[in-house]
Image (spheres, rainbow, N blue to C red):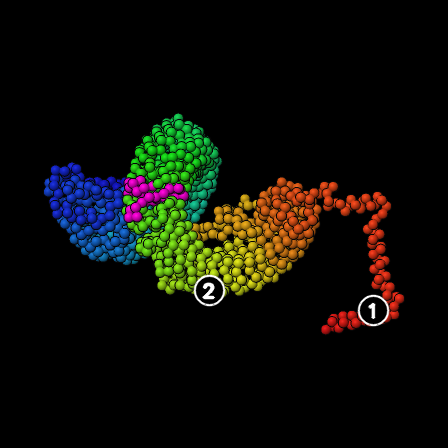
Amino acid sequence: MDGSYNIVVFIFVWLLTLSNVDLCICNASSEVQCIPIERDALLKMKCHLSDPSNKLVSWSPHENCCNWALVVCHNITGHVLELHLTTPPPLEFNDKTIYGATMFGGEVHPSLLDLKHLNYLDLSGNDFAYMQIPDFLGLMTNLTYLNLSDAGFGGSIPLQFWNLSNLIYLDLGANSLRGSIPHQIGNLSNLQYLDLRGNEFNGSIPHQIGKLSNLQYLDLGVNEFNGSIPHQIGNLSNLQYLDLDANEFNGSIPHQIGNLSNLINLHLGNGLLSISVENLRPILTLSSLQYLELCRLNLSNTHDWLQVLHSLPSLRELHLFGCDFTHHYEPSTLNFSSLVVLDIFNSDFGTLLIPKWIFQLKKLVQLQLDDNGLQGSIAKGIQNLTLLQHLDLSQNMFNSSIPDWLYSLSHLKSLILSHNILVASISSTIGNLTSLVTLDLTGNLLEGPIPISVGNLCNLKKLAFSYNKGNQQISEILKILSVGCISQALEIFYMSGSHLCGYLTEQIGFLKNLVELDLSQNTIQGPIHSSLGDLASLKYLDLSNNAIQGALPSSLSNLKTLIYLSLWNNSINSSIPISFGNLTSLMYLDLSENQLVGNPFETLRSLYKLKTLFLEYNLFEGVVREAHLVNFTQLQTFSADKNKLTLKADPNWNPSFQLLRRLSLASWDIGPHFPSWIQSLKHLWYLDISETETFYSIPTLFWGTIGNLEYLNLSHNHVDGDLSNIVINTTAPYSVVDLSSNKLNGQLPYVSQNVIHIDLSSNKFSGSIANFLCHKQEGIKWSSFLNLASNNLSGKIPDCWLTWPELQTMNLENNHFTGILHTTMASLLELKMLNVRNNNFSGNFLSFLKNKTNLISLDLGENQFSGKVPSWVGQSFSSLKILILRSNKFSGPIPHQICNMSVLQILDLAHNELTGYIPKCVKYLSAMLVINSTLESHIYFEGSFGLLLVEALLLKGRVYDYSTNLGLVTSIDLSSNKLSGEIPKELTRLKGLHFLNLSNNQFIGQIPQNIGNMESLESLDFSRNQLSGEIPPSMSKLSFLSLLNLSYNDLRGKIPTGTQIQSFEASSFVGNDLCGPPLNNNCSSNSSNNKFDKDREVDHVKGINWFFVSMALGFIVGFWAAVGPVIFSASWRYAHFQFIDRMWYKLQSHCYY
């Protein structure tokens, strides 16, 4: 800690003394006039720079350039000496990055050469889009300070660059520079600070680096340097900071490093360096070394490295990152006389416990052991470290309660135990940690309320308790924080995802110094309390994903310093107060997924610093005009889809938000013409203007401007035009193109290989798809999602599937394709969904699917496929959830192996020629056995945004749209086949089944008595079979039934009584011998159905049973009519027996042959 501090102090002091004391900045030099030629040079520079934040607005040709921002002149001569064209780093709030001023870009112009006296140039923190460092910079020999770090430069360093012999400070870190460092680096003999960190330099480090005798700071880390570390580094006697980590060095540490007697800070490792005790010995002579970092080193065979290191007399900080200590070693004695900071991160101790040797370091002030896979209880030995001020045990797997002894470390200022598995509640003795400044318990399983004693932590500035099981009223927490002295200190309070409930109260306004507040992902309800507007220092406020209701309070407009505001996914139901326009510091605003009304841009139009704006899924309405958006010059994300807003803009409009990267206006009315102004947005990578009432054709020029787009959605409009000769070419990897549900025509357009999601469905494309699928220009296609459904495409499917190896979802339904599907489709190893419904494909069941064990959905319906359903489907389709084979010519029995498909949710074999019985093993269809509480509402898989897209289900002549909850649907449809036998009683075990259709078959027997067990049934159709017997009484238990059809069977008796059954129409029961509601015929004792029985009873009373009388008479007449002639006539008798003989002969002959 102190070592780093010394280096920073050194650099800071050195920078202060670097410039001449006669210099002055901006207004201080207002009496000095700049040199005209230098002013013109700067104006040329400005013209070639992109300045989105308008930081160079003061650079005017009519003003003195010595008064311009970012320019420093000599206070006597007026020459320009310094240019500070840097961009500060972004703001960080709760792991969220908010970019402030937008970076410079464009071109570094050679006009800089006219600044003959320039000695200080800072272009750091910008984005020059991988352009090479300009050659002419090597001619600016007066430069003593040059900072090009993190500026987006690429390529190799120009050779002229090494002629800048006056340079004292050179920082090229965090770019994409590559190539080797030439020996000319030795020419920079005055260099004191050199930073090349975080590039792609390779090759060996030239030994001439040893000539930089004035060098005090050298950082070569995080590159690809190889070879050995040059021993000439040992000549740099003034060196105080040396970083060589994260390279590919081999060999050992040169012993000459031990000559660096002034070295304070040393970073080594993460390569092929051989680190052993002997290799570490060279650093033991570094008597000034205070900070040592060893990264990614294997110390498992180096048994006494601790004894070696503890001989460093000045060592204060030891940092070990990603090291291997698997040889479990516990020295008996260890005495680091000066060590105050120990930081071991992401390393392997060879044990799940904290090594005991750490507890011998009695002088430790800071102990960091994060992300080391430690488990169990927090080791009690830590309490021996009584001087500890900072303890970080985060990102491990400690699974105990927080031990009480921990609260006795009275010097603790920072306690970080986040992202473990800590349980139980927080003890009230936490109030003993009165020195605590930071307390972070995020991401554990801690339960119960925050103790009242927390309110007595008078120095606590940060309290992070997110993602635990607080189960506490937010009002109770606010009372604790507002009553005690903590209210005057607390600046950061995070408690998101902690099961908080209740209402925000006025106590929230007592936390006057609060800068960051995150209470998101709870169930806080009621309105936002107006006292929240009293937090004048607040910069970050996140109340998203709660149950907040009511209106937005106008008091929030008092938060003048607010930068980040998120209220998404609540139930706020007002308009945005006009006073919200006063929040001019806002850079990030998310009001999406509420019930807000009105025109938001009437209020938000003045928020000129906004960079991110989310307004989607509200009830906004009204007309948005150009004037509403004119101040959004910094806007980069603009998402306001799913509202009822109308954009009125001139066709030639040039929007002010030229930095925009994401634009989502889905469901707006921006038509009727395609918005050509979109073509001016050069930085756009995400565009969604679906459902925007756009008509007519897309300008041809538009397709030439989409090269940077990663997401393009123009779906559900009325766009027409022939795209046969259009190239949809995006250079961005993993791009998405959705042009579905329009009126586009012609042949399919060419789509570049980078597009992974292609949706051209529901258009009027026609002709063959051979050119689309088999285009040879780019070779392999990386698409995982292809939807060409509902077009007029025709012909055979070409055989070129080897060029689509990543395809996971393919939908070709509702076209006019013919022929067979080639067996080369077996090369689609990632295939998870195949839909070819409603075409004219033919052939047997697709044999190439036999090894597709990852297949989730298969729809071959409404084609001309034939043959048997193979038995291997049960084994190969173990992951299948949807199988649709309806309306084909499949024959033969249903293979019993289909019961092995345990996750099957939808089985549709209707309208085929299947025969045989329903397999009794259907009881093993596990996904249908249980009620849908265990199923997800969507069917997911990797790729294609994770959501499986399936057309609406066709169930008993009705179309059911389950696009949002398909994962909850279970269905069996075997209708219109030739299936026979009884309905197996095992079918009634499918309690989770929603739809069952067995109509139009040849089933016999009774309806299973336990049909009422199928309690999830919504639709049941047994019509047009030969079922007999009575309707089981248990059917009245089916309370969710919305469709029932038992018509045209041989059912009899009374229809069971039940609220649901009697609600169906009589047509559900016709063609049977049934009675009772909803039929008109009555089943009572006086009904006509019993008339026969009653007549029989009357006749019996009279003593005559006419049925038996008529039967006797009939027998007598029939007997004598047949037998009488044979007895009384010889010719009849002869003819009769001759006929019998002939019939017997014919029967014998037939059986023989």
Q: Which residue bears the numbered disc 2?
A: 796
- Residue placed most toward the observer, 456 or 69: 69
- Residue plotted at (57% across, 63% down): 867
Left or right of 472 in this view: 1098: right
Q: Which image quarter is the N terminus in? A: top left
Residue 73 versus residue 781 in the image, above or below: above
Numbered disc 1: secondary structure: helix
Q: Which mark is residue 1136?
A: 1
Compare marks 2 and 1 and give the one earlier in the sequence: 2
| Res. 476 image quadrant | top left
The answer to whether the residues at label 2 and label 1 have Cβ atoms under 8 Å apart is: no
| Alpha carbon separation for disc pair 2 and 1 | 69 Å
Numbered range of the magenta stretch: 624-653
Q: Which mark is residue 518?
A: none
- Point out residue 952 in the picture as x, y percentages from the top left corner: 50, 51
Is residue 641 shown in magenta?
yes
- Residue placed most toward the observer, 908 or 74: 908
Give the amino acid at mark 1.
His
Q: Does the image show residue 1026?
A: yes
Question: Foreground mark, 2 or 1?
Answer: 1
- Residue plotted at (17% across, 44% down): 82
Residue 819 versus residue 587 in the image, above or below: below
Left or right of 409 in this view: 1006: right
- Residue plotted at (24% across, 43% down): 54
Tag 1: Cα neighbours inside 10 Å, few (<14), some, or many (≥20)?
A: few
Q: Does the image show residue 441?
A: no
Residue 491 versus residue 938 in the image, above or below: above
- Residue placed most toward the observer, 56 or 32: 56
- Point out residue 190 in the picture as x, y percentages from the top left corner: 18, 49
Is residue 907 shown in magenta?
no
